[in-house]
Image: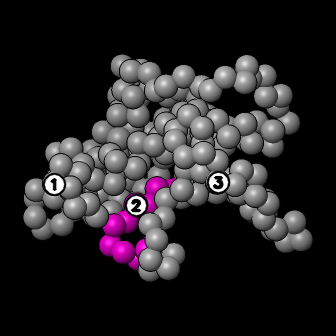
Amino acid sequence: WQRVPWCAGRAEGGPLREVGTHFLFGLQEIFGARCVRRVRATVTYPADRRLCESGAEGELELDGLVLALRVTTDGSATEESGGDDRYELRLDGEGGRSLLLEDFTSLRLEQPLPRGSRTMVERAPYGRRESVESVAGAVRKMRGERDGGSGLPPPRITAREAREAQAVLDAILASDGEWVVPEYL
């Protein structure tokens, strides 16, 4: 998964910490602070206890919404994508509709035929501020909400937002297949 030793180690690295937290920040941006009510996940590790997780599967429960969690570093997603890494967050809704966030920069609304797929944001500038603002704006527009934005980029991640993402990450790591409530401060 990672060749840099600190990113490959269980104590500080791994895909949940290195990539998963970006999705958690995106969830907070779209659904609000402390939006994750509880989690249930199973995290798998290689035999070498020094190495980070090799995968995770589970669910994140928000108010009235359950999101599937799937993280793999076994190469299966890379094979499916023709050799490229894949970073996706899919929010499945009613009536077969879903939002698909890809590579932190593109958002697609998927609907049953005859409507089909519609790209809402394509390759926004890479970076949390730029891509999350583009995605959040597209979601607000889809909901029929006015943007109401100042045109300024959203602020950088605050210490509170980082602690809230860490609380969800800690709950995922501790879950062991059971429902766990994040311990927000």
Q: Is residue 126 magenta?
A: no
Q: Position of residue 31 (x, y in %)?
A: 61, 34
- Decide: few, some or many residues near mark 1? Use Cα within 10 Å; few <14, some 14-19, many ≥20: few
The answer for how far apart the CA atoms under marks 3 and 1 are is 30 Å
Which comes before the other along the chain, label 3 or label 1? 1
The answer for how far apart the CA atoms under marks 1 and 2 are is 20 Å
Name the element at disc 1. helix
> Which image quarter is the N terminus in?
bottom left
Name the element at disc 2. strand
Q: Relative to 33, does residue 67 appear above or below in the rendering? A: below
Q: Residue at x 89, y 71 (%)?
A: 114
Looking at the rendered structure, the kind of residue marked 1 is: Pro
Q: Which residue is mark 1?
A: 5
**Does the residue at mark 1 contact the one at mark 2 (Cβ under 8 Å)?**
no
**Residue 90 appears left or right of 53:** right
Q: Which residue is mark 2?
A: 71
Looking at the rendered structure, the kind of residue marked 3 is: Arg
